[in-house]
Image: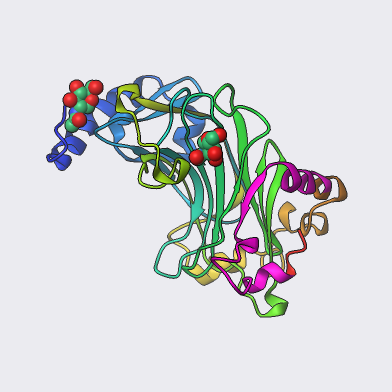
Amino acid sequence: MACPLPNFMGCVVLGVFVAFAVLGSVSSSRFDELFQPNWAFDHFASEGELLRMKLDNYSGAGFSSKSKYMFGKVGIKIKLVEGDSAGTVTAFYMSSDGPYHNEFDFEFLGNTTGEPYLVQTNVYVNGVGNREQRLNLWFDPTKDFHSYSILWNQRQVVFLVDETPVRVHSNLEHKGIPYPKDQFMGVYSSIWNADDWATQGGRVKTDWSHAPFIASYTGFEIDACECPDAVAAIDNVKRCSTAGGEKRYWWDEPTMSELNLHQSHQLLWVRANHMIYDYCTDNSRFPVAPVECLHHHH
Ligand SMILES: *[C@@H]1O[C@H](CO)[C@@H](O)[C@H](O)[C@H]1NC(C)=O
Ligand SMILES: *[C@@H]1O[C@H](CO)[C@@H](O)[C@H](O)[C@H]1NC(C)=O
């Protein structure tokens, strides 16, 4: 679809019609149940349970969950942009709203053909991030679908790749460190151009002759406590906690409060073999290590 960049609004409006034509005819039921496109409707296509989202020189694209959640597990299977994906970023994340928001991020930083993608994770608490970790993967994420998920409960936030934990952010409130547990979050994904920083520190720019850049999605899963807009925030917090609520949630079971032995070993293996950056050990950025780093024994 031709749409000149300066006429962005015109593009969005025109896009609405095209998108309904595409999404309406062959739509992924699970996607439609849980999510909706929220940026560049015309950059989506779906086929059965498969959804494709594209980045081209006109626009990126994104979708968001229809509901907000507190605690539980969210996951999506993604097949990342193939070939030359330098300059592109595909993100999958949870976030609350407002200036003191919390956020749990997976960001997939594209690369030139044959060079490894990087996965950057970050955790924002009360509006403050700066907790980046970066890893490469033990597989080529452009060849097949792999699952990326986030487990969130009162004790820990766990980032998982194909069910292998790659990061744990523990609740250290007993050490006076704030933990994200009082704001409900939406679930989001997007693809956009970030060639000012994403690939090899911004040295490699997006090669638009390889556009459109397409990320494919399937396996949309949200098993979490839903927070309806109609319910007051404070009541949602109560409803979503096993202690205060009438329900007993699986993610509050004692076995979910920390990694089991097998998972601890998996995390050690990931950190030893695949981690290439950890804010906790970046002395030039943080001459004094961030306080949670002294306590995160992983
Ligand atoms: C975007 O890409 C298309 C296809 O390669 C090209 O024809 C068009 O001129 C480009 N537009 C801009 C604004 O760069
Ligand atoms: C891209 O590949 C280069 C060379 O292997 C590597 O140093 C870099 O970490 C990779 N990822 C990104 C996002 O630059």
Quarter where residue 284 is shown: bottom right
Identity of the residue drawn at 33% across and 29% down: 207
Quarter where residue 297 is shown: bottom right
Residue 236 point in image, percent of width and height: 54, 64
Q: Check the image and report above or below for 106 versus 21.
A: below
Residue 77 point in image, percent of width and height: 57, 32
Q: Farthest residue toward the right?
A: 261
Residue 41 visible in image: yes
Q: Farthest residue toward the bottom?
A: 176
Q: Check the image and report above or below for 78 versus 243.
A: above
Identity of the residue drawn at 73% across and 44% down: 270
Residue 1 visible in image: no
Residue 63 point in image, percent of width and height: 40, 41
Identity of the residue drawn at 24% across and 33% down: 58
* In-front residue for pair 13/212: 212
Q: Check the image and report above or below for 178 versus 43.
A: below
For the C terminus, the image quarter is: bottom right
Residue 175 point in image, percent of width and height: 71, 78
Query: Does the magenta-highlighted stretch encompass residue 268?
Result: yes
| Range drawn in magenta | 265-294
For the N terminus, the image quarter is: top left
* In-front residue for pair 270/76: 270
